[in-house]
Image (cartoon, rainbow, N blue to C red):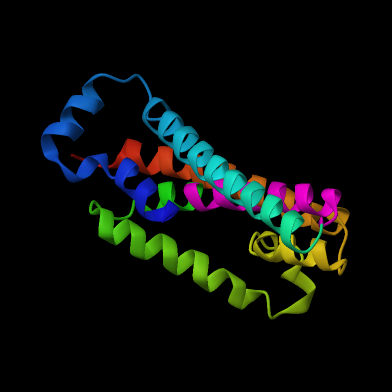
Amino acid sequence: MVVVVAAGAFTFDSRHGLATFLRTRIASFWQLLAPRFTVNAAAAAIGYLLGTLAAWFETDLLIGAPPAGAMLGGMLCGAVYLAYAVAVTALAATFVRSTLGAVGIALGALFLLPVAGVYRPISNWLPSALANAPVDLLNGTHHLSHYLPAFAVTAAVSAAALAIAVLRLRRREI
């Protein structure tokens, strides 16, 4: 759902009139992407955190409190991964003009990345490692420090995706 909503925000070039209006009012394409990225990433993270807090509350009531450190670490990993998904969607939207096309490219990238995780030496470095982190942290399989390489790669790839999206939008004709 996050990818679909974000793709709708990033495909402003799909309507010629809107694209012309926006492009004539900005000094840099970063001014178009930054608010869209921030709002979508924040909304995804807030929704995820509220849902996880509700599940944490219900779990505590019904079967006992899960470890607080593991829950907080899992929420951090999930929020970072969602911000990465929004950055990938921003980049995907620069390859096509339609929302559906951007959704397809972004979901394809997000679904194919875990396939690279079968190669064990890089699996802990991939952003997709953060998607499983909440379960592994609660099970005690890993500690939060195990995910530091994935955090670093995810932050770097997210920043690169946004920078490339700005460059691609700058070169795109209306």
Residue located 24% across and 51% down the image: 97
Q: Quadrant of the N terminus?
A: bottom left
Residue that extends furthest to the bottom in the rendered view of this protein: 118
The total number of labels drawn is 0
Which range is magenta? 65-86
Is residue 110 shown left or right of residue 136? left
Whether residue 80 is visible to the viewer of this picture, yes or no, is: no
How far from the left and from the top, in percent, is residue 174? 18, 39
How far from the left and from the top, in percent, is residue 33? 41, 34
Q: Is residue 52 magenta?
A: no
Residue located 49% across and 33% down the image: 38
Residue 133 position by quadrant: bottom right
Is residue 27 shown left or right of residue 75? left
- Image position of 126 with respect to 168: above or below: below
How far from the left and from the top, in percent, is residue 54? 62, 49
- Image position of 21 with respect to 129: above or below: above
